[in-house]
Image (cartoon, rainbow, N blue to C red):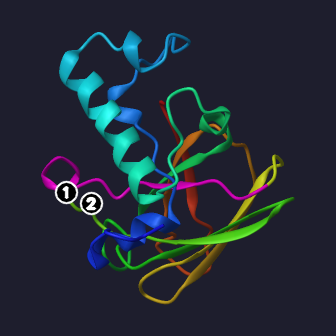
Amino acid sequence: PARGLPPRLRCLLHCPLPPDHNVPTTERSGGVDQIVDPVSRIQVKTLDENCDEYGIVEFKMLDERQAMALQLQLVGIRDHRDARGATVTASSDGGSETWFAAAGGSYASASDSQIVVCPAGDGLVDLSIRWPDGSREELSGLSRGNRIAIVQAGDPSNAARVVMLPR
């Protein structure tokens, strides 16, 4: 599936892409053609086409997995504020998958360090985070379909702080 995809972009084959910033936050049943802003509509259609062409997993606008994902914003305290280099393993009743925190890769997403995890299954999600400084934290029983910030504990004897963010 990566044929023709530049090596620097092959990491996209391992993380699902949602078109979050361009889709309506309420009614979505009309699909991409319902997006009022013409630039956003073109961006979502282009994302769909590129993901299809290169075999990249995308949670398209009407994909039922949109609510199955968990959006994470990692906040480092002891090293890298944006947690670049952190490893997140998400587990659920269907297995586990690992993602790596990195800064965004283009002009519009250069400061977006959000990670979207969607392990197989439909149960609650458990996370294991290895921060860039080597410390580890475990979080369990997180509900899918949420957007959360996880703030690294300032002291290794304390737990990470979880903050619900608006979707």
Q: Is residue 141 above or below residue 152?
A: above
The residue singled out by tag 1 in the image is: 110
Residue 42 position in % (x across, y down) = 25, 27
Q: Residue sitting at 59 percent across and 36 percent down?
A: 66
Residue 112, magenta (yes or no): yes
In front of the other: 21 or 111: 21
Q: Which comes sooner in the sequence, label 1 or label 2?
A: 2
Query: Would you call the spot at circle 1 few (<14 residues within 10 Å), some (14-19), or many (20 or more)?
Result: few
In the rendering, at what x and y percent does residue 100 appear? 46, 73
Q: Which residue is identified by label 2?
A: 104
- Pointers 1 and 2 in contact (C-beta within 8 Å): yes
Q: How much space separates mark 1 and mark 2, taking CA atoms?
A: 4 Å
When asked about the image quadrant of residue 2, the answer is: bottom left
Q: In this orientation, does residue 76 appear?
A: no
Residue sitting farthest toward the left: 107
Amino acid type shown at disc 2: Gly
Q: Give me the residue at 46% from left, 42% from top.
A: 18
Quadrant for residue 3, please give it.
bottom left
In magenta, the rendered stretch is 106-120
Crowd class of label 2 (few under 14; some 14 to 19; many from 20; radius 10 Å): few
> What residue appears at the point 31 percent right and 69 percent down from the top-left corner?
4
- For residue 50, above or below residue 127: above
Q: Quadrant of residue 93?
A: bottom right
Q: How many marks?
A: 2
Q: Amino acid at mark 1?
A: Ala
